[in-house]
Image (cartoon, rainbow, N blue to C red):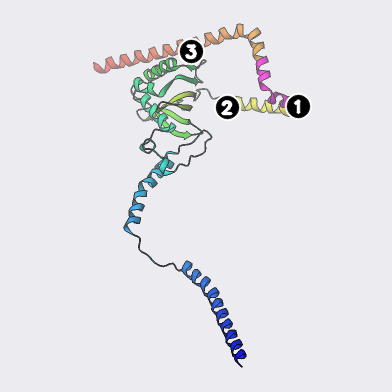
């Protein structure tokens, strides 16, 4: 009898323990889910609010950094944390685009001293209006000095678009205006490559393309049509020519220098001199007309 009562009580204890464990396993995940879905409300402390307010300037610094669009040499935007941003980057070292804008402002202000700060010592400028490029700061500054003198006091560069490329390269679309009136045949594009010297950006290379007063668009289209017809008729020769154009150009230049250059170069030089003489006569005529009109209006 005692043994049967002992077995019954032990069985009841096992059932109670099993039910309590099952109850715990079923209610604990439910409680965790309820806690995750409905978190307990809490009021942030003053210390937490102060930490949040202290982080606000860093957020502003990151926005300013992203606004400046600093890029590395591969043209990929640099991602920098707020702790790595120093005061110089926040205060704003001029970017390549800003440097070129300031460069044109110096030309418009006719300030050669300030303009020289944007030119590197080994600056190289290729202007398509001239036969020879300008190499070195001395030649470049002489060119810009002549340019500013030729512009007078009322002609200004108007920068239309500034596009910043990979690294420190900038493309500019501009035209000239006289007292806010566009001057005909003065549109152009310039491409600049800047470099860092000390703590400033300077212009290292530039290429200037100016609108031509002659418009040989029809002639160019006719030449393009004829060349494409020849390419279609002789595809193998066209592929060889397009794959190795340097060899063809070098051979043509050798033939030109041997047979044609002694006759054509003097003609081209005399042609340029004639145009320079005509331009001088035209400028002299304008000065004479201006002087006569000035004397008549005074009287």
Q: Position of residue 201 (x, y in %)?
A: 42, 28
| Left or right of 252 in this view: 189 | left
Q: Which residue is mark 1?
A: 236
Rendered residue at 69%/28% (across/down): 228
Residue range corresponding to the magenta coloring:
237-251
Q: Which residue is mark 2?
A: 217
Q: Quadrant of residue 266?
A: top right
Mark 2 vs mark 1: in front: 1
Choose the circle earlier in sequence order: 2 or 3.
2
Q: Quadrant of residue 17?
A: bottom right
Is residue 27 shown to the viewer in this render?
yes
Q: Neighbour class for label 3 at 10 Å: few (<14), some, many (≥20)?
A: few
Choose the circle earlier in sequence order: 2 or 1.
2
SS for dot 1: helix
Rendered residue at 55%/75% (across/down): 26
| Left or right of 299 in this view: 79 | right
| Left or right of 243 in this view: 32 | left
- Seen from this angle, which residue lies furthest front? 2
Asked if the residue at tag 3 contacts the one at tag 1, i.e. Cβ–Cβ closer than 8 Å, the answer is no
Is residue 177 shown to the viewer in this render?
no
Instruction: Give the alpha-carbon distance from disc 2 to disc 1, as whole Å.
Output: 29 Å
Residue 249 sits inside the magenta stretch: yes
Q: Which residue is mark 3?
A: 275
Rendered residue at 43%/17% (across/down): 137
Rendered-image quadrant of the N terminus: bottom right
């Amino acid at each position: 009898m005692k043994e049967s009562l002992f077995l019954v009580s032990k069985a009841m204890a096992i059932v109670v323990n099993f039910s309590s464990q099952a109850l715990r396993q079923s209610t604990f995940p439910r409680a965790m889910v309820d806690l995750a879905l409905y978190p307990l409300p809490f009021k942030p402390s003053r210390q937490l609010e102060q930490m949040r307010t202290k982080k606000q300037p860093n957020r502003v610094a990151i926005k300013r950094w992203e606004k400046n669009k600093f890029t590395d040499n591969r043209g990929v935007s640099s991602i920098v944390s707020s702790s790595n941003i120093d005061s110089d980057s926040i205060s704003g070292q001029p970017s390549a685009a800003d440097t070129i804008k300031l460069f044109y402002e110096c030309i418009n202000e006719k300030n050669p001293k300030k303009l020289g700060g944007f030119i590197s010592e080994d600056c190289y400028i290729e202007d398509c209006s001239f036969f020879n490029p300008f190499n070195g700061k001395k030649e470049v500054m002489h060119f810009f000095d002549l340019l500013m003198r030729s512009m007078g006091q009322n002609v200004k560069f108007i920068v239309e678009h500034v596009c910043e490329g990979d690294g420190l390269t900038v493309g500019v679309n501009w035209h000239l205006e006289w007292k806010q009136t566009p001057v005909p045949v003065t549109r152009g594009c310039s491409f600049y490559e800047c470099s860092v010297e000390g703590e400033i950006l300077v212009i290292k290379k530039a290429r200037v393309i100016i609108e031509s007063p002659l418009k040989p668009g029809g002639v160019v289209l006719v030449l393009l049509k004829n060349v494409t017809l020849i390419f279609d008729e002789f595809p193998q020769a066209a592929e060889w020519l397009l794959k190795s154009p340097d060899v063809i150009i070098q051979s043509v230049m050798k033939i030109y220098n041997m047979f044609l250059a002694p006759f054509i170069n003097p003609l081209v030089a005399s042609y340029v001199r004639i145009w320079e003489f005509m331009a001088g006569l035209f400028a002299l005529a304008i000065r004479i007309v201006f002087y006569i009109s000035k004397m008549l209006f005074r009287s």
